[in-house]
Image: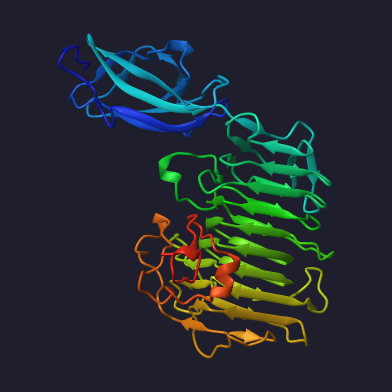
Amino acid sequence: MITTSSSAKLGFSSNALSFDTAFTTIGSVTQYFQVYNNNSNAVTVSSIRLGGGNNSPFRLNVDGVAGKVFGSTTIHGKDSLFVFVAVTVNPNDQNSPLIIRDSILFETNGNQQKVMLEAWGQDAHYIKPKPGSFIPLSDGTGLYYSIIPCNTTWGLTDNKPYVIYDYAVVDSGCTLTILPGVKVYMHINSVLWVYNDGTLNIQGSAAEPVVFQGDNLLSSYQYNAGQWGKIWLSPGSKDNTMDWAVIKNGIIGVEADTNVDRIPTLAMSHCLIENMTGAAIYGLGSIINADNCVFANCQQYCGAFIYGGTYQFNQCTFADYWAGTNQRTSPAVLINNNYEPASGGPQIVRPLSAYFGNCIIYGNSQDSEIGLDSAIIANYFHYKFDHCLLKVQGSYSSSRSFSSHNIKVVLNQNPFSSFSNPNTDVYTILAKGPAAGTADSSIVNMYPIDIKNMNRLSMGEYDIGAYEH
């Protein structure tokens, strides 16, 4: 029996749906709600429609049927139906986000009820492969790519964000410059690929850092790692720089690959790289210099420096408090000078030199947060932790093959002021803790500006790590 009483109103699991920023032309994550008939008898919903009709940017799917206007729909007594909603925002050539509102109207026995819809949209530059831009791989798969115009500057003409799909390539002999305040949104598995002889220059500022993150901007994805691939400084790329950048929620933050010509691969300062399912900074036989950076909360490593190379980190914090569903089994920092070729054959060993000055390497592992993996060959494995705060287990040497002059380390003392929730991005140190006032002043004098743009030299005493308290 179908009731025709005007008192037979519908119930809703939600009276409003809100969509966080959706990029124009791309669409949003689909959301849904349930429509309940709480009456004992069936009711007929004579009309379900979007208030904006066919011109609405929202799209509906009602119990498996797509559309924007639906005719008579019967809901049995004490039953329900599902309504799925998505939205696509049309380009409008505006740099600022715009808000779009509509409603879903339900008419039942003379009653009109509604569920409100709200979405924020933003126009953007889209870096997407053209048809046929495909590189086949030996395993039968392949990758789609786009070539970024040579010697391009992002952020020079407008404030629109950039959205990268698949592999976006900085080609050989070309430079990509990214100016302060630019936001780069990476689609799932996408990679910014700096090719042989190419260069990436990220020129953020303290007030306007350059930001890399996934392109799903729902608030529930704010701390979801693994949403995109990596920034890949592939073999032969050179003179890459990163100043004042925030890189988060990918698989690998920055991978600096083999450099056989001994040309600097990457110089970085005042960067925050966090929340990766792989590693924040991944050096493979490369040359990396970094100061006043934070590498944090990764499932595998905050820093992995393998297959040899030359690495220098000053006033940096490596803090691994990974809180993902898969338990972390790796140290926060790994140093390695050897590898087994995939094709088989003898172990290959390369010279490694790694220096850490005024650095914190700490985390929530029950084991050491430093992994030293050496194929011992004379002059092939050098490291030094100079005025650092470290979490280690068992016997430990703070230096090998470096001069031991003036070395000082603090072991196994928690340096952080607040880390009950690693999703709060808090890497500041205890004001009277073991990292406070224990830095080497000669290193501070070379790298005086901390990651919050504070001048350490004005503080009177100097702290270990990227933050001056």
Q: Give 331 or 413, whichever is nearer the viewer.
A: 413
Of residues 276 and 312, the one nearer the viewer is 312
Question: Number of callouts in the render?
Answer: 0
Q: Residue at x 37, y 13 (%)?
A: 51
Q: Nearer the viewer, residue 125 or 8?
A: 125
Q: Please identify the quadrant where the N terminus is shown.
A: top left
Residue shown at the point (63%, 46%) measured from the top left: 203
Instruction: Left or right? Give the position of 164 relative to 360.
Output: right
Can residue 345 be seen here? The reply is: yes
Q: Residue 266 falls in which quadrant of the image?
A: bottom right
Residue farthest along the bottom direction in this orientation: 395
Residue 34 vs residue 398, the one in the foreground: 398
The residue sitting at the top extreme is 110
How far across and how far down the image is residue 329, in percent?
Answer: 52, 72
- Say whether residue 274 is left or right of residue 334: left
Q: How is the image coloured?
A: rainbow
x, y percentage for residue 270?
Answer: 56, 56
The x, y position of residue 365, in whole percent, is 46, 74
Say if 429 sits above or below 182 in the image: below
Task: Indicate whether 376 appears above or below 21.
Answer: below
